[in-house]
């Protein structure tokens, strides 16, 4: 729009009164124009912001390294993708240099997508005399934004494949936004994406000493490394034969082999494990195998699974767990963290953990208030992600919103002391709440979750449990 400059009308021929009127009209007109210009600027900024909400402009580089058996892989083709509900979008591609380094220029990444890198082929420095290896396939799922640096290796491959197994078909990653986000959020539990080493959770005090997950993880990484570096002339063909799925599909690179094992972890695990000795026999006079990664398994697993333990947020003797619409885990605690707990008193609170296992409730106490005291086995999530629970200690029904704020009274819903020890609760699809009172042998019903409309069924007016008007019948036959 061309810019015009206007000057006030000449007042030489006007009377003083006319000049004043003309001046006021000019000032008013100029003020209106200024307001219009300001509004136009505001709406331009708003429109620009809305556009950015759909496409994240990221004129940035993704730098990283591709490694095999702890050493660089030169000449590997590295491709960055954005995954969503449909086919992934290729964002950038390049090759690693002689030091295994790459630098990808990324202009834009689609909103609500999960980014991942795939490395194919190249010459591993750990076996440079053997030339390029087309059977190399590695992956690193990065999450919703680009990291400053990434290392793509066996560890990132195992971590990314096992967390995203249900969304991977070969090297194609696709799924729901929530599912992909949860999967990507768990990758750092296993691997540090920047260094390519172990993540914090897998090597913490609980998982490193109480689970075999580190050994499972490193054993799988060692087998991939055996193919990448061709520790034996037939290492890749033997790995692919052992990783062939139950339907006869034979992998053709290390990424596909990992996907096949992760999707069928129960299938011939002993055959896969046997490769560890074939690839890395214990040298004469030594005690340990010369594997690139430690620790490794001593015995074959029953399945190639990678379980992790989590705690925190007041978690102590959980009796029931439920998952809300965002993948958060709610747990009903029977004991109090740090107390001399005993079975005679269940007095714990509520805990909430994010999909990646991080505590969302207060570290020691969990969520308290609202009458919560010892959940037992009664826990349910409604359509609004509110948490309903029955209590053993306080003999009440309690309700918390999704942030952990108690919605029930300080003593919970007790209905004038009519409840005994509560041990079960469900929320029906229509919002009705049903709870079980095992002490008074009665069923408590809250239509649409409204405690003001409470109803009691199978009420026993005697002290004899055999006189209860309701009876549990087992299926015949």
Image (cartoon, helix red, strand yellow):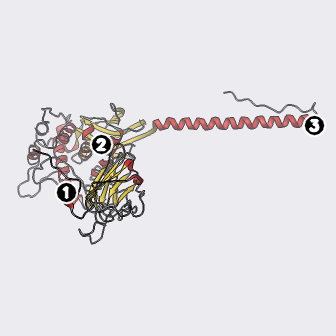
Disc 1 + disc 2, Cβ < 8 Å: no
- Earlier in the chain: of badge 2 and badge 3, it is 3
* Residue drawn 12% across the image and 50% down it: 301
Between 427 and 305, the residue placed more toward the observer is 427
Query: Disc 3 versus disc 1: distance between alpha carbons?
Result: 94 Å
User: What is the x, y in percent for residue 399?
Assistant: 38, 56
Are circles 3 and 1 on residues that touch, CB within 8 Å? no
Query: Which corner quadrant holds the C terminus?
Result: top left
Work out which residue is located at the far bottom of the displayed protein and give it. Answer: 340
Q: Residues within 10 Å of mark 2 (few under 14, many from 20)?
A: many
Residue 75 seen from this side:
no
- State which quarter of the image contains the N terminus: top right
Label located before the other in sequence (3 or 1): 3
Q: Are marks 2 and 3 in contact (CB under 8 Å)?
A: no
**In the rendered image, which residue does mark 1 sit on?**
211
Mark drawn on residue 325: none
Q: Secondary structure at mark 3?
A: helix
Q: Could you say which quadrant of the image residue 63 lies in?
A: top left
Residue at horizontal 33 percent and vertical 37 percent from the top: 176
Label total for image = 3
Viewer-side residue, 456 vs 42: 456
| Inter-mark Cα distance, 1 to 2 | 24 Å
Checking the image for residue 16, the label placed there is: 3
Where residue 131 sits, quadrant-wise, is top left
Position in image of residue 233 (x %, y %): 10, 38
In the image: residue 107, left or right of residue 357: right
Name the residue tied to disc 2. 140
**x and y, in percent, of residue 456 in the image:** 32, 54
Helix, strand or loop status at disc 1: loop
């Amino acid at each position: 729009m061309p810019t015009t400059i206007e000057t006030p009308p000449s007042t030489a021929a006007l009377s003083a009164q006319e000049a004043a009127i003309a001046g006021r009209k000019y000032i008013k007109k100029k003020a209106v124009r200024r307001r219009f210009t300001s509004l136009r600027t505001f709406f331009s900024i708003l429109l620009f912001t809305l556009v950015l909400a759909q496409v994240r402009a990221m004129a940035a580089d993704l730098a990283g390294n591709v490694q095999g058996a702890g050493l660089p892989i030169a000449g590997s083709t590295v491709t960055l993708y954005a995954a969503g509900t449909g086919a992934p979008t290729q964002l950038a591609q390049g090759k690693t240099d002689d030091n295994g380094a790459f630098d990808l220029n990324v202009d834009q990444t689609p909103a609500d997508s999960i980014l991942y890198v795939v490395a194919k082929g190249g010459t591993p420095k750990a076996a440079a005399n053997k030339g390029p290896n087309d059977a190399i396939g590695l992956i690193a799922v990065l999450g919703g934004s680009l990291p400053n640096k990434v290392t793509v290796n066996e560890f990132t491959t195992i971590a990314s494949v096992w967390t995203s197994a249900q969304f991977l078909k070969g090297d194609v990653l696709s799924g729901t936004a929530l599912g992909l986000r949860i999967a990507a959020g768990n990758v750092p539990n296993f691997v540090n994406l920047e260094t390519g080493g172990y993540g914090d959770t897998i090597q913490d005090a609980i998982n490193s000493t109480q689970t075999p997950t580190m050994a499972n993880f490193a054993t799988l990484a060692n087998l991939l490394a055996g193919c990448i570096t061709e520790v034996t002339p037939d290492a890749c063909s033997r790995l692919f034969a052992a990783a062939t799925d139950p339907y006869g599909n034979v992998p053709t690179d290390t990424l596909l082999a990992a996907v096949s094992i992760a999707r069928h972890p129960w299938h011939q695990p002993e055959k896969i494990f046997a490769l560890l000795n074939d690839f890395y026999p214990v040298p004469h006079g030594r005690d340990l195998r010369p594997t690139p990664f430690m620790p490794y398994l001593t015995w074959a697993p029953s399945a190639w699974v990678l379980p992790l333990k989590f705690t925190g947020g007041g978690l102590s003797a959980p009796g029931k767990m439920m998952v809300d619409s965002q993948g958060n885990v709610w747990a009903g605690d029977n004991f109090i963290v740090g107390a001399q707990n005993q079975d005679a008193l269940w007095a714990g609170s509520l805990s909430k953990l994010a999909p990646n296992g991080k505590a969302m409730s207060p570290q020691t106490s969990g969520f308290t208030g609202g009458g919560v005291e010892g959940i037992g086995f009664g826990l349910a999530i409604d359509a609004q992600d509110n948490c309903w629970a029955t209590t053993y200690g306080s003999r009440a029904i309690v309700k918390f919103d999704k942030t952990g704020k108690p919605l029930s009274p300080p003593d919970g819903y007790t209905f004038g002391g009519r409840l005994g020890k509560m041990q079960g609760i469900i929320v029906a699809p229509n919002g009705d709440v049903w709870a079980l009172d095992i002490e008074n042998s009665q069923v408590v019903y809250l239509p649409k979750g409204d405690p003001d409309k409470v109803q009691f069924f199978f009420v026993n007016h005697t002290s004899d449990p055999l006189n209860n008007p309701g009876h549990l019948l087992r299926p015949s036959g």
